[in-house]
Amino acid sequence: MKYSFPDLSAINWEKLAQDYFKATQKRKVAESGKSYQTCVTGIPQIPSSITLRDYQQTAVISWFRNRGRGTLKMATGSGKTITALAITTELYNKIGLQVLLVLCPYRHLVTQWAKECERFNLNPILAFESVYTWQRDLSSQLYNLRSEQQSFVTVITTNSTLMTEGFQSQLKFFPEKTLIVGDEAHNLGSPRLEENLPRKIGLRLALSATPERYFDDQGTDAILAYFGAILQPEFTLANAIEKGALVRYLYYPVWVQLTAAEALTYAKLTKRIGWALNNNENLLQNETLTSLLMQRSRLIGAASNKLAALRDLMSERLDTHHTLFYCGDGYVDNSSAAYRRQIAAVTRLLGLELGYRVTTYTADTPLAEREKIREQFEKRELQGLVAIRCLDEGVDIPSIETAIILASSGNPRQFIQRRGRILRPHPQKKRATLFDMIVMPPELERETWEIERNLLRKELKRFMEFAQLADNADEAEKQFLDVQEKYEL
């Protein structure tokens, strides 16, 4: 799909890029920002405590040279938010940018963006939850902007709020010199969200470690068509570790076998997946295939033997702190008549059986409670957090030193996002440790085994990529090579 953009031809983008490049050569970005310092609050200003890394400066220049549009594909934890706010500051200083509009997929990201914006001298309007808490303030500030009583407005909202009539009715009042930033932009590729993105706003920046949508080329194309192509150079996990933006790590795969009952269900699902793959060319619209893959993913994620593996592992680590446990949303049979969610079973095992001080951290945890939990975790009052998906995107808890992944979906984005969560730097953290529970496939019939090998090959490729960057790469890679040999991959 092609879009018509507002006319920003009067802006000399190449000169902006060259001027910014010259400024970075003469002095630190933080020092260059001081030349614009003012006592007026609410306008963008780089704080003296921040100096952009070279790759962040390169990203700013690349976005300018792409004429005010583009997608930054940068590893989780590499400073995408600060890069976006540096672009905002430069646009305000050079072309008189008037509005910064940030779109976030989740509420907790709104509050995290607010904290960063405040460091940059901004007073953001947090437009989420009830329309009555923000609409009047937004209308008032946009009016002040038009009447020149105010020079800059910052708005941070959620993707769901963007689609509401209350927010959509305000978009027509946003001026031409507005920058829209899509955080975790891969979430914006769904048809309903994409059609609600404002066409009037021409300055566009997408941020994501993984802008490509899983099994959704059309959605990926829609994101890049709206925001602009992925800008080079991409900033990978290896780049981030090399530059010190992320810490180094140790990686230990933990191999888990299915029970006899689970293996039987697994074989049946795999055979049905094979039929669905062979009988349908349009995989994206194949609801049967999607359902089967989800069922098998949940079966693997909640494999009962993972609890035994976790018990063995943590029995030797009871004096540790700052540990994160990633669970799936499936159910396990914990040797009882009643099934329970994996997160409940893990919490019970750690807390009641082993005496390891943990609490759950989920989407249902209120924002105020989350902040309290983070403080307790930081201070070692809590030894661990047991989480599901809410820690996959954007949540910043850099004190995490160890992660134990009990369940992952087949989506590579989830795997990449989780790595970044674990490797964020912290003053007390020299290196991170990751234990990754990997379910080994059971013995299958010959026909079903060919299907399984193709699925397993994709899984092992992702694990191998992570193993290769670990400090114990030789040890980790050898285990995967042994698996490749066993299953003739």
Image (cartoon, rainbow, N blue to C red):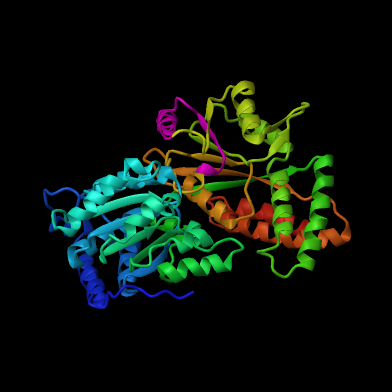
Q: Residue at x 34, y 50 (%)?
A: 156
Rendered image quadrant of residue 232? bottom left
Q: Quadrant of the C terminus?
A: bottom right
Instruction: State left or right for residue 82 relative to residue 272.
Output: left
Q: Residue at x 54, y 46 (%)?
A: 250
Single out the residue that lies furthest toward the right: 445
Q: Residue at x 44, y 54 (%)?
A: 163
Residue 330 on image: x %, y %? 67, 40
Residue 233 visible, this angle: no
Instruction: State left or right for residue 111 relative to residue 391.
Output: left
Pick the front one: 155 or 472: 155
Residue 22 on image: x %, y %? 20, 70
Based on the picture, tell me whether residue 17 belongs to the magenta stretch: no
| 479 in relation to 16, above or below | above
The residue stretch that appears in magenta: 367-390
Rendered image quadrant of residue 369? top left
Residue 33 on image: x %, y %? 18, 57
Residue 260 on image: x %, y %? 84, 41
Pick the front one: 365 or 233: 365
Residue 175 visible, this angle: yes
Callout count: 0
